[in-house]
Every structure is written in structure tokens, then in C-alpha cells.
């Protein structure tokens, strides 16, 4: 039976990492990420959860569509041409597949996310 996923329920899993563990991605700082997974499709191509990051800047992941709702904090997305968009508490946005650029977390940021993985 398929059920509606409530983000108020206990997460399926929780993970933490320092993005410095992926040195080819980090541009500045040492952002620490905490991810609470609320949903993962059987094939792993659709995931949803809550994510928190401390300040830092890194190359955005590619080959995915990501919808975000900022619950707290301040972050910026910067494309490779230098165009920046700021997002704060209450903002929502979609990062479509094909976006090339950077995440820049200005203040510790928490978001709900839904990601559709488009990699092979």
C-alpha cells in the first residue's frame, strides 16, 4: 500500500558528512551536511528529505532535478556566468537538470528537498 509521506514523521535514515570529504567539489569553507531521508523510491532515482548545511561554497551536483523549500537560513545559487540568486526562509525553487554552478551557504541553511536523479 502506498502512503503519503509526512516530513513530520521520523526519518528513514540520517547521515552526516563534511563536504571536504569531496575535495574536488569544495570551493571555500568546510560545509558540514546533515541529511534526513524521508523517502527513497525502490530504484533510488527519487528521494526526498530534509538537509542542513553550515556555511561554505561548492560545485552544484549535476544530472538531477531538485525542488527545494528553505526552512531557515540564507543560501545563494551562482551559475557559471556569475548570475546569483539568493534564497532565504520561506523561499522555494527548482534547480533543473543542466544547471552548472555553485551552492554558496551564507548562513546555516535547512531545506526540504525532492531530487529526481537523472544519471545513468
Image: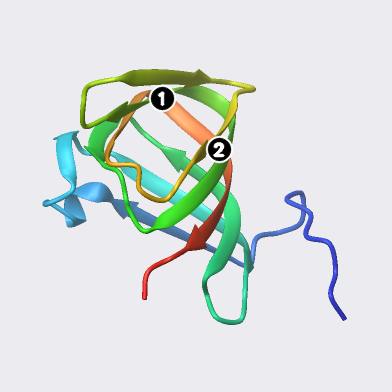
Q: In terms of secondary structure, where does tag 2 sit? A: strand
Q: Residue at x 42, y 27 (%)?
A: 108
Tell me the CA gap for discs 2 and 1.
Answer: 10 Å
Q: Is residue 71 toward the left or the right of residue 78 in the image?
A: right
Residue 84 on image: x %, y %: 33, 19
Q: Residue at x 53, y 55 (%)?
A: 115
Q: Residue at x 53, y 60 (%)?
A: 116
Q: Please name the residue that numbered disc 2 is placed on.
A: 111
Q: Which mark identifies residue 75?
A: 1
Is 39 in front, or is 117? 117
Mark 1 packing: few (<14 Cα in 10 Å), some, or many (20+)?
many
Residue 90: quarter of image: top right
Question: How many numbered markers are drawn?
Answer: 2
Callout 2 touching callout 1 (CB < 8 Å): yes
Q: In terms of secondary structure, where does tag 1 sit? A: strand
Mark 2 packing: few (<14 Cα in 10 Å), some, or many (20+)?
many
Residue 81 on image: x %, y %: 21, 25
Q: Is residue 41 above or below residue 59?
A: below
Q: Which mark identifies residue 84?
A: none
Residue 82 on image: x %, y %: 22, 21
Q: Residue at x 51, y 48 (%)?
A: 66
Q: Earlier in the sequence, mark 2 or mark 1?
A: 1
For the C terminus, give its image quadrant: bottom left
Q: Is residue 65 above or below residue 72?
A: below
Residue 30: quarter of image: top left
Amino acid at each position: 500500500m502506498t502512503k503519503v509521506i509526512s516530513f513530520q514523521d521520523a526519518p528513514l535514515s540520517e547521515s552526516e558528512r563534511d563536504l571536504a570529504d569531496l575535495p574536488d567539489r569544495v570551493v571555500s569553507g568546510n560545509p558540514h551536511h546533515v541529511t534526513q531521508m524521508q523517502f527513497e523510491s525502490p530504484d533510488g532515482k527519487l528521494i526526498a528529505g530534509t538537509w542542513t548545511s553550515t556555511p561554505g561554497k561548492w560545485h552544484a551536483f549535476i544530472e538531477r532535478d531538485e525542488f527545494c523549500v528553505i526552512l531557515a537560513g540564507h543560501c545563494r545559487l551562482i551559475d557559471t556566468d556569475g548570475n546569483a540568486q539568493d534564497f532565504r526562509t520561506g523561499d522555494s525553487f527548482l534547480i533543473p537538470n543542466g544547471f552548472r554552478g555553485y551552492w554558496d551557504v551564507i548562513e546555516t541553511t535547512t531545506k526540504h528537498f525532492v531530487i529526481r536523479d537523472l544519471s545513468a
